[in-house]
Image (tube, grey):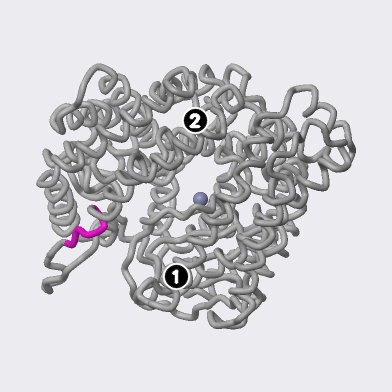
Amino acid sequence: MGELPFSGRIERQGAMNPSTEGQSATWDLTGLYQTPKDPSWADDLNRGLELARKFHAAYKGVDFSLLSPAVFSQVLKEYESIQEEKVKPFLYASLLFSEDSQNNEYKTLLQNAKERWNDLETEILFFRLALIGLSEEKVREVLSYPPLKNYEHALLFLRRFRPFTRTEKEEEILSRKNLTGRSAFTTLFDEFTGSFTFRLEVEGEEKELTGSEMLSLLYSPDRSLRERAFRTFLQRHRDNHLVLASVFNALILDAQVEDDLRGYRGPMHRTHLENEIPPETVDLMMEVTESHYSLAQEYFQVKACLLGLPKLKNYDLYAPLPGSRKGIAFDEARALLRQSFQDFHPLFGRIAGEFFDRRWIDSPPRRGKYGGAFCSGMTPALHPYILLNYTGNLRDVLTLAHEMGHGIHFYLARRQTLMNFDAPLTLAETASVFGELVMTQALLREEQDLSVRLALLCIEIEDMIATVFRQNVLTRFEQQLYQKRRERLLTSEEIGELWWQANARLFGDSVEMIPEYRYGWAYISHFIHSRFYCYSYIFGELASLALFRKYEEEGPSFLNQLIRLLERGGSGSPHELLKEAGVDVEQGDFWQKGFRVIRQLIDELKSLGPWDKICVGPPI
Ligand SMILES: [Zn+2]
């Protein structure tokens, strides 16, 4: 799955089983440009670059510490508006491309936009470095100027990287050498694994499938298909272990060399700074998560029972229950979502209504379309868009609610300026978690059919397990990997052993891993693209669940705090924003709160017995 340079796009892997779509919605992009041939697209792109060049000519070499706060504020806003110029044509091209990646016109458009993006970035990079290099006194002086009040977080955030930023010349060398170093290995990984195609018999027909299509078969109700797909997929990675292990080894070493050159203390230091989370907080969060592994194991046993299996194999984890196939036409899902969001808070209902009425959603699966779901946050001047592959099953309805949560978050953050717009990674899932839980509760209230109720709860719990427990496993594995690589080059068997051990701790006796899973590390692109990224998922989910718990305890009076948190976008640190919403990460039992929500859902699932009637497997 290609990752785009713009961070405001939040993706979600989904099952791909195009079937009936009922009614559907397509998005209307004419608010951005009339057509892909619209001359104003190229005009905007050129104007952005033109402004960047002028900016470079006017300010390169200027000593910013000598500027008055008023002039400094002007320059900062100019810089911000250039950023805004570059984003619109790029996002338009990337939305078209996600609509149809086979379309050559869209491909060219996106490629052009990316190249211009890089050209523009090069022109204005010096200013970012100058911002990082400002002295403490100067930052304090400019922040005392009222129009800059809201930039406090953005400017202080950049300063955190000051001790680890080298001179402009050194930065340039590092960045240019990256083309043949880090980014060459990343591209090799993407292109190499992206070229894998797999032949597999699906429903009696021999098919040629891509890697993400193979993984989406893990959501198939057909057990033998899930097994064949997963084994075949992993075997291909095993067959290519030499290249893949070599890429991992090179990238880890590269990160270590650069960290040493910059003076970072340990492999996670930089990520912690980016996430604005102290290392002790992350350590504690991961320990508490580990101490709850038994919760996941308890769920896996319930699931085995529901599937009629003595024990789950790891290709059964996402197997759908029969009730999840309940068909819900898009129109029905839309009505359900509008009503449940409206009942939750009128503002949520109103914004969701706008998404449907003004056609900001693209719902039906199509050939060439991006296979999962995402919400593109765009910029404060533009509104967000949502892409889905809506086929009408329960998971799709929850995905709609999830992405709508993101949409509402971006919508509310539009009162910020671009530099303060994107919520920190660790808070980016707040509204989506709420959206999903609100929808689940609404569906549970209406639904009488036991099999559908079971399926709903399972989908919710599985999402949480994937976001909290699995990401903890991934992060533990990554920590081990970096530690061992410090000592020497690692073979793929050694990497596989670390991977196996980390997973075994989560599964315990409740899930059996297939032997090919020793190569399960080799396809996870987060390890390649953004190291230690995965722990922010744990933080985000547990923080959102803690907020949800607070909402359950305090009722609707809490919602104003939630909305204020969403409106703040990225204008504060995660710690600060959460504190304003009334939860304190530092408090001893903070991390326990999220697990209570998971516990509650598992208890609710178990209360749906009698288990001797619904359970086709051994008793739990
Ligand atoms: Zn999300």
Q: Is residue 195 magenta?
A: yes
Rendered position, 511 above or below 416? above
The earlier-in-sequence mark between 2 and 1 is 1
Query: What is the quadrant of residue 510 in the picture?
Result: top left
Residue bearing mark 2? 271
Amino acid at circle 1: Phe
Amino acid at circle 2: Thr
Rendered position, 39 above or below 492? below
Q: How many marks?
A: 2
Q: Residues within 10 Å of mark 1 (few under 14, many from 20)?
A: many
Residue that appears at 66% across and 58% down: 379
Residue bearing mark 1? 97
Q: Is residue 174 visible?
A: yes
Residue 252, percent from left and from top: 32, 30
Which quadrant of the rendered structure holds the N terminus?
Answer: bottom left
Which quadrant of the rendered structure holds the C terminus?
Answer: top left
Determine whether the residue tagged by mark 1 lies in a helix, strand or loop.
helix
Q: Is residue 412 visible?
A: no
What is the distance, in whole Å, between disc 2 and disc 1 at their CAs?
30 Å
Residue 212, percent from left and from top: 29, 58
What residue range appears in magenta?
193-197
Q: Nearer the viewer, residue 526 or 154?
A: 154
Residue that appears at 49% across and 52% down: 5
